[in-house]
Image (cartoon, helix red, strand yellow):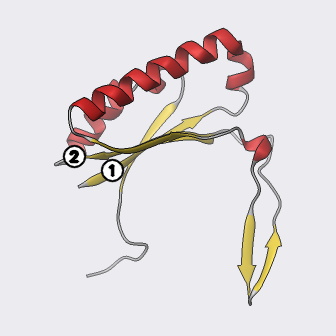
Amino acid sequence: MPYMLLIMEPPGQRAERGLAGGQEAYARMLRFGDGLKARGLLLATESLASTEQAVRLQVRDGAARMVDGPFAETKEMVGGFFLVDCATRDEAVALARECPAAEWATVEVREVAPCYQGA
């Protein structure tokens, strides 16, 4: 069953960490991903650029428009993700606990599911 491990990090953290600290954190995350791949659990992974380069778009009544944000005062941004294949939610939570980013960010565990609810 696929689960998404979303890395929810404070937006200013990357700048505060500096280049050397950032490279070390990234190397740790790469090793974590390599370990998941070796165990046959990794489906996909990506690191995302900071929100300064992001845009937000909506389409309403056929018209596309840019909307406000991302906002500098937000408390968290999605910094990246690991898409993993786990037998249970507990297994996905255990993987999140192993993730190095849990030391400096929040790892949100979400089951992949359709965008509707009901039977």
**Residue 58: horizontal and vertical position, in percent?**
73, 73
User: In the figure, 56 relative to 14: above or below?
Assistant: below
Please identify the quadrant where the C terminus is shown: bottom left
User: In the figure, 110 relative to 94: above or below?
Assistant: below
The answer to whether residue 86 is left or right of residue 47 is: left
The answer to whether residue 20 is left or right of residue 8 is: right
Amino acid at dot 2: Cys
Q: Front-most of 62 and 106?
A: 62
User: In the figure, 22 relative to 86: above or below?
Assistant: above
Amino acid at dot 1: Tyr
User: In the figure, 85 relative to 107: above or below?
Assistant: below
Q: Residue at x 73, y 17 (%)?
A: 16
User: According to the image, label 1 marks what residue?
Assistant: 3
The image quadrant of residue 52 is top right
User: According to the image, label 2 marks what residue?
Assistant: 86
In this figure, what is the number of numbered marks? 2
Q: Front-most of 46 and 58?
A: 46
**Residue 72: horizontal and vertical position, in percent?**
81, 41
Cα separation, mark 1 vs mark 2, equals 7 Å
Crowd class of label 1 (few under 14; some 14 to 19; many from 20; radius 10 Å): many
**Residue 59: horizontal and vertical position, in percent?**
72, 79
The answer to whether residue 23 is left or right of residue 63 is: left
**Which label sits on residue 80?**
none
